[in-house]
Image (cartoon, helix red, strand yellow):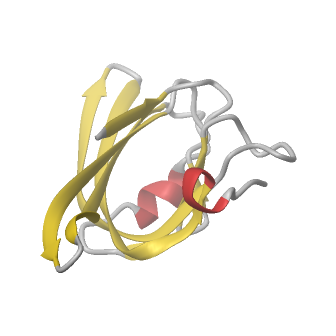
Amino acid sequence: METYYNDRRLDIVFDDGRVDSDFPTIRVFESATTVDSSTGNLRERTSVKFTIKYLETPESPCAELRSKLIFGRSGVLTYAPEGTDTDKPAYSCNATVLGVVRHPHDDITVVSATLVRNGEWIYHYEQFGSIF
């Protein structure tokens, strides 16, 4: 299952580095496997990958995030599709950076980072009703 968020209110933080940029996006890819059990087939989610994209400009304050989005680095990924106002959905998990690609264009750099979830969700709106 794939979910795509691109609202201007979208808030993304990785290891205390915030995506403070215009037009941030996050894609969430959840893959599932079927496990046989004595009661029938159960659906289990085994892998969750994230692709974060945003624009860096010389004026954008993303330097802290840039230093954290390094291959192999682990940290807490938190995202809020509707912003961090009270009672808005929240998602959070431990994640590891699988790769980062930067495409420079004049004075703008398009950044695309892929991360994978480690362990279980810390916050998850649909599963736990997690909100800010």
Percent from the top left, x then y, of residue 105?
Answer: 29, 21
Q: Is residue 82 above or below residue 118?
A: above
Q: Residue at x 28, y 30 (%)?
A: 104
Please state which of residues 17 and 61 is positioned toward the viewer in this rendering. Answer: 17
Where does the N terminus fall, quadrant-wise? top left
Name the outermost residue toward the right: 86
Figure label count = 0
Q: For residue 103, which quarter of the picture?
A: top left
Percent from the top left, x then y, of residue 31?
Answer: 22, 53
Q: Residue at x 21, y 56 (%)?
A: 32
Q: Residue at x 61, y 66 (%)?
A: 16
Q: Is residue 17 visible?
A: yes
Where does the C terminus fall, quadrant-wise? bottom right
Q: Is residue 16 left or right of residue 84?
A: left
Q: Is residue 68 above or below residue 27?
A: below
Q: Is residue 13 visible?
A: no
Please state which of residues 23 and 7 is positioned toward the viewer in this rendering. Answer: 7
Q: Residue at x 68, y 34 (%)?
A: 82
Name the outermost residue toward the front: 39
Q: Is residue 61 left or right of residue 69?
A: right
Percent from the top left, x then y, of residue 26?
Answer: 43, 39
Percent from the top left, x then y, of residue 18?
Answer: 60, 52
Q: For residue 68, which quarter of the picture?
A: bottom left
